[in-house]
Image (spheres, rainbow, N blue to C red):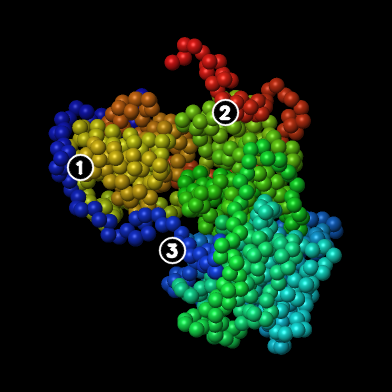
Amino acid sequence: MVVSLARSWFGRPHPKKDRASPVLHSRAFTEPHASPHLTRRRRRTRLPFLLAFAAIIVITWHYFGSTSSSSSSPPSRAITKDSLRRMLGVRSKAPPGSSLIPSSSSPFLPSPDPLPVHHDVHKMIYHNYPLSIHRPPPNQFLRSPSASTSHPVVAIITATNNPRRAALLETATSLFGQSMQNFLWVIVDDHTDETDSLALLKELAESDPRVTLLHNLGFKGLSQGRNVGLKHVFGRKEVPPYLISLDDDDLFELTALEKITWMMESNKEWGLGGFYYVKWGEGANETGNFVPNAAIYRSDAVLESGCRYDEQGFSAGGEDWDFWMCLAEGGYWGGSALEFLYWYRANPPSFRAKRWGDTFKQGAGSTFLQLRDHIQKKHQALGGDFPVKFPRPSIHLEPITWEPPFESGLASTDKSIVFIVPWLYLGGADIGALHMVQVYAEAGYRVTVICTLFKTPQGIELKPEMLKWTHDVHVLPSFLRTNDFPRYIKHLITSRGSREVIFSNSQLIYEMLPALTEQLPDVKFIDYLHNEAYDGWKSGGYPRYSILNQRYLARTITCSSYLRNWLLDHGHLDASRIGVVKLGIDIGSFKAPNNRERNAAKAEILQLEPETTVITFVGRISDQKRPLLLPRIIDSLLDKVGEDFLLFVIGDGEQLEALRRQVRLRKLDDYIRILGARTNVRDYLAATDIFLLPSMSEGISVAVSEAMAMGLPIVTANAGALPEQLGVGSTKNLGGVLVDHSIENEESDAEMYAYELGSLITDYSARRKLGDNARMIVERELGWKESLKGLMKETKLARNLEEFRREADPRYPNPSVYTAIETILLEDSKVSDHFGNHPLKS
C-alpha cells in the first residue's frame, strides 16, 4: 500500500529522456558561495614539539590573529578576591558533617551568551578559555564541607615572583573550581618585593586550608623555588601520590586534575603523564612556540630517580625540559590524555623580556639554542635508549574493582544529573542528547556527560557544543583503560550526588546495569530509546536491551508512540513505566521560503533555473538510510517524467564511495549530485522542492523535521515512527507521502518511490499542500524546547523496582541468561548449536 495525498498522474504520456545528453534548465554547478571548509572535513592540525630525542605527547594550537579568534583582552568574569572568597565560602552554609551543598546556596546557571569550545585550529575561539563569560560558571564543582586536607591526591607547586593579581586569581579560580578538590597547592614566593603581590600571596594562603605559602630564602630562580616546594612536599608525613608544576598565570580545564590522576591510576606503569594544551594570550604566535611546563608526575618516580630542578645549569630557563630528561634517564616516562586540559598563557614580548631576558629569542648563537645544545649533551645517553610507554591494553575478564583509588573531596548537590551516550557525533540522536543537557542546565542542574566510545574527529564533533552547558564532559577512552570504566562511572555518579542517570544507545551500560544497580541501589537509571534496529541487530537493538533489563530500569522513555507500542508488543510488562518524549528541532531557525525565495536560492546556491525540480536527500550514507537505492529510484523516475529534475545527496558515511560508483555505472551523474557533508543544510533545503528519505526505519528523524519546518513535502518509508512524524494518528492532513516498501525487493521499492516523486514533480499544488501541512505539524508537535519539557516530568515519575533486584521474579527477564547464550553463539556456534551440527545444512 502507498499512503499518499498526491493525485494520480499515470494517464498522461511522457517522453523518455535521452540520458546521454539531457536538456536541463541548469548552469554549471560550481557552488561559488561555499566556503572552503565546507567542501571537505579537515582533521586537526597537530604540532608536536620534539625536544632532544623524544618528548611527551602534547599538541599546541597556534594563534592565527584573526578577529574571530583574537585572544587579547579576553572577556573574563572579573575574578576578584571577593568572588573567589564567595566561591570558597559556600561550604560553610552546608549542614555540619554533610557533603551536600544545596543548589540554593550556590546556584549554577549557564552563560546567557554561550559559545562552543572548539579545539579545531580552524574554528578555535581563543578568548573562550575556562573562565570566559561564554563558558559555564566556575562554581560547577565545590569542595565538600566534610572533606579532609590530610590525604591530598596531588600536590601542585607554583613558584612565583611578583605575580600579577588578575592572572594569579584566574589560576587560583581554575584550581579551586576543579572536579578533583582533594589537592595541596604549594605556592613558593621567589623573592617577591612588590607590595600588592605580597598582599595577594598572603590573601591566597589565608583563603583556603589547602594552600601553603613558602618562601625561597636561597638564590632567586624557578629551579630553586620549585625545589623548595618539592622539599616541603616530600617532607610531609604522607606524600601525595602525584605532583604538578603550575605557572602562576596558566589555567586548567575544570575536570583536568580528576582526569589525569585517574589516567595515572589506570596506567600504573607510567611515571608521568601529559595532555593536550592550548596556547593563548597576547604573546601567542603562529611560530616560535615552546612546550610549557605542563605534566603530572608520580611522586615515587621523582623520589626514586632523585631528579630535581637543576639550579646551576638552567638558571636562565629550560629547567623543566631538563627535569623531564632526567626522569627519562631513570626509565620513567608515560603517555597523554587525548584531550585539551591546559591553557598556557603566552605573555607579550615585553613581559617575557622582563622575566627571561633573551632566553627565548631564537637564531644563531641565541640563549635558546645554547640551552637546547646543553640539554642534548647532558642527556646524550637517551639518544639510543629512550623509554617508550603506551597505555596497557585491557584484557578479557581482567579483575574489576569498584572502589575509587582516592577521595575527590567534591561536594554533592541536590540538582545534579548524569547523561551517558556512546559518543557525540553530529547526528539526530546526539543532537537530541545535546538539547536534553541544555534543558537541564538552563533549569539550574549541574550536568555530567559520559561518552563510552571515542573516535576522533567524528565522534566528538558535538563536544564543543556540549561544553557550552557544562564543564563536566568525560570521553572515557581518551584517558582510561576499558577495565576502569565501571568504577569511574560509579565515581562520577556518586561524587556528584546524582540520583538520576539518563542513558541512550549504550550497549555497555545495558550490559552493566545489573552490576551498576547493585553498586548504586538508590540511583534511578532511565533509558531513552530512538528506534528499533532495522537490520536485526540484537533482535531489535537497544529496545530489546531495554526489555531484557526492565527490572533494573526506573523508567523507559521513547521518542515516539510507535516505539512505546513496539516495546509492549515485544515483551515489556508495564505500560505505566514507559513515557514518550519526542525529539524536536529549533523551529525558529527554519523558515519556509515562498516561491520567489526558493527560486532565488536555486539560482544562488545551485545555479539552477526555477523550472528544475530539486529533490534533496539528507542523512548518513549508511545501510539504514538506503542510499544505494537512490540511483535505482532516479533510473526509474527518468522513465516516467519529462520534466527537468535533479537529486542532491547531502551526507557522509561508509557507503559514500559505493553510492558514487553506482551513480557512475548507471550514468546518472547529470541527475544525481553527491555533495558529501555540509554545514549549511538549510541553504539547500531553501532551494528544494521535495525531500526524499527512503530509510529502512527511523525514530523521530531530525532531518525529516528540519525539511518539514522548511515547508517541504516528504517522501519516505511507511516504517518506524515516520508515519507518526508525518501526522498519522494526529491529523488527516499528512505532511508527506509514505511508501510501503518491502526492503527485500529493491526494484519494486524503487518503482514505488519513483511513482510518488513523479506525482509530486508534476503536481505543484499537491507539493504545496503537503509542505504546508508539514510545517503546521512541526509547529504543533516538534519544537524541541516544548517537547523536551516532558523529559523532566518523565524523570520525576521514575521509580526503582527494588523487590525485583533482590529476588527472582518469573515475569521479568534475567539478562544474564541472554548474554550467556549470545556469547557462546558468537564464540563457537558450530559446536554449541543444533543448527551448526545438522547433517542436512547446506
Q: Earlier in the sequence, mark 2 or mark 1?
A: 1
In the image as oriented, which residue stretches furthest toward the top?
Answer: 840
Dot 1 amino acid type: Asp
Residue that carries the numbered disc 3 in the rendered image: 122
In the image, residue 10 above or below residue 596: above
Residue 460 x, y percent position in the rendering:
51, 52
Dot 3 amino acid type: His
Residue that carries the numbered disc 2 in the rendered image: 827
Residue at coordinates 35% horizontally, 48% vertically from top-left?
A: 676
**Numbered tag placed on residue 23 in the rendering:** none
Give the camera-side residue of 553 and 111.
553
Residue at coordinates 29% horizontally, 40% vertically from top-left?
A: 661
Q: Earlier in the sequence, mark 3 or mark 2?
A: 3
Q: Nearer the viewer, mark 3 or mark 1?
A: 3
- As measured in the structure, the alpha-carbon distance from the residue carrying label 3 to the one carrying label 1 is 39 Å
Q: Are marks 3 and 1 in contact (CB under 8 Å)?
A: no
Dot 2 amino acid type: Glu
**Secondary structure under badge 3?**
loop
Q: How dense is the environment of label 2, judged by Cα within 10 Å: few (below 14), some, or many (20 and up)?
A: few
Dividing the picture into quadrants, the one containing residue 389 is bottom right
Q: Earlier in the sequence, mark 3 or mark 1?
A: 3
Q: Is residue 96 left or right of residue 59?
A: right
Q: How dense is the environment of label 1, judged by Cα within 10 Å: few (below 14), some, or many (20 and up)?
A: some
Q: Are marks 2 and 1 in contact (CB under 8 Å)?
A: no
Residue at coordinates 68% horizontally, 57% vertically from top-left?
A: 261
Residue that carries the numbered disc 1 in the rendered image: 644
Q: How dense is the environment of label 3, judged by Cα within 10 Å: few (below 14), some, or many (20 and up)?
A: some
**Secondary structure under badge 2?**
helix
